[in-house]
Image (tube, helix red, strand yellow):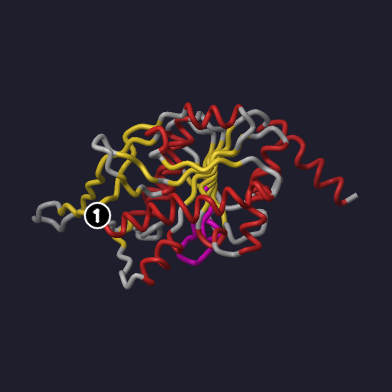
Amino acid sequence: MQTAEILIEALPYIQSYAGKTIVVKYGGNAMTDDNLKQQFAQDIVLLKQVGINPVVVHGGGPQIASVLERLGKESKFIEGMRVTDSETMDVVQMVLGGLVNKDIVSLINQAGGKAIGLTGKDGNFIKAKKLHLKKKAAEGQSEEHIDLGHVGEVTSIDPRIVEMLDNDRYIPVIAPIGVGEDGAAYNINADIVAGKMAVELNAEKLLLLTNTPGVLDNNGKLLTGLNTKDISQLIETGIIQGGMIPKINCALDAVVSGISSSTIIDGRVPHAVLLELLTDKGAGTLISA
């Protein structure tokens, strides 16, 4: 009976999401633990099997850091963004577009799905330009401009190649590497690419997997629901900082742009994607406009 009740609980969610697109940003511990990797692949295949169209956008920070360390190169971050010189960009393309992307594709295929790996350079479908990071200055001082190297921001996304794969029963797995007008490659924050992708695909929902239960307050308590005003206050008071800032901003931008909802969930929880999408309880922090 318990098994039957669980299946029945999932039914209205399956009906609600049927034929719709769910963009999932895949990163953090869920990408480094073998059991969690297999469970994530199973979740994605199950969603496709019941008529939902998952699109996976992945990161690969730990894997990039590991290769850089072996090369004797230190990883440096500013406001949650990896500083990416030419040598680091070569590593990013090798790790994200090769090792990590194909590992995810293989896991999904082994679980019974049909995954296709892409980077934004394939068909030039993610156009980008150099990101110019501006840092707030103290009173009376000029604004500081920070050069992050080959770090980019999305200028446009052509969704046709992803839609074609969706319609042909494939599961797109996308590495967040964009291409400039001059053909230069850019390392783009995977959360930002996932958010922009969700908007371009008119997705029903955006899921961002991370290494925390969601957004936490000063006492470590999970904040289950946030809106624009809440987020502004949390950033101003320093409760939201570092790598969580681009994550929360892209989730907010997506819902402001028309996505039904965005949720930041804990990728360390087994089958976190299914728990969020197909159960009454859900998981993580829901972002609304």
As for residue 97 lying within the magenta part, the answer is no
| Residue 99 located left or right of residue 246 | right
Q: Nearer the viewer, residue 261 or 29?
A: 29
Image coordinates of residue 271 in percent, x first then y, are 67, 54
Give the magenta-colored segment's residue range: 208-221
The quadrant where residue 86 appears: bottom left
- The three-letter code of the residue at mark 1 reads Leu
Q: Residue at x 40, y 60 (%)?
A: 239
Q: Residue at x 56, y 31 (%)?
A: 165
| Residue 142 located left or right of residue 252 | left
Dot 1: element: strand
| Residue 133 located left or right of residue 81 | left
Indicate whether 124 appears above or below 75.
Answer: above
Image coordinates of residue 236 in percent, x first then y, are 33, 54
Q: Nearer the viewer, residue 162 or 17?
A: 162
Q: Residue at x 74, y 35 (%)?
A: 12
As for residue 211 lying within the magenta part, the answer is yes
Instruction: Report the magenta stretch's main SS.
Output: loop
Image coordinates of residue 285 in percent, x first then y, are 54, 50
Q: Nearer the viewer, residue 236 or 267?
A: 267
The quadrant where residue 17 appears: top right
Indicate whether 158 appears above or below 35.
Answer: above
- Mark 1 lies on residue: 148
Answer few, some or many: residues within 10 Å of disc 1's Cα (few below 14, many 20 plus, some between 14 and 19).
some
The quadrant where residue 171 appears: top right
Image coordinates of residue 76 in percent, x first then y, are 30, 65
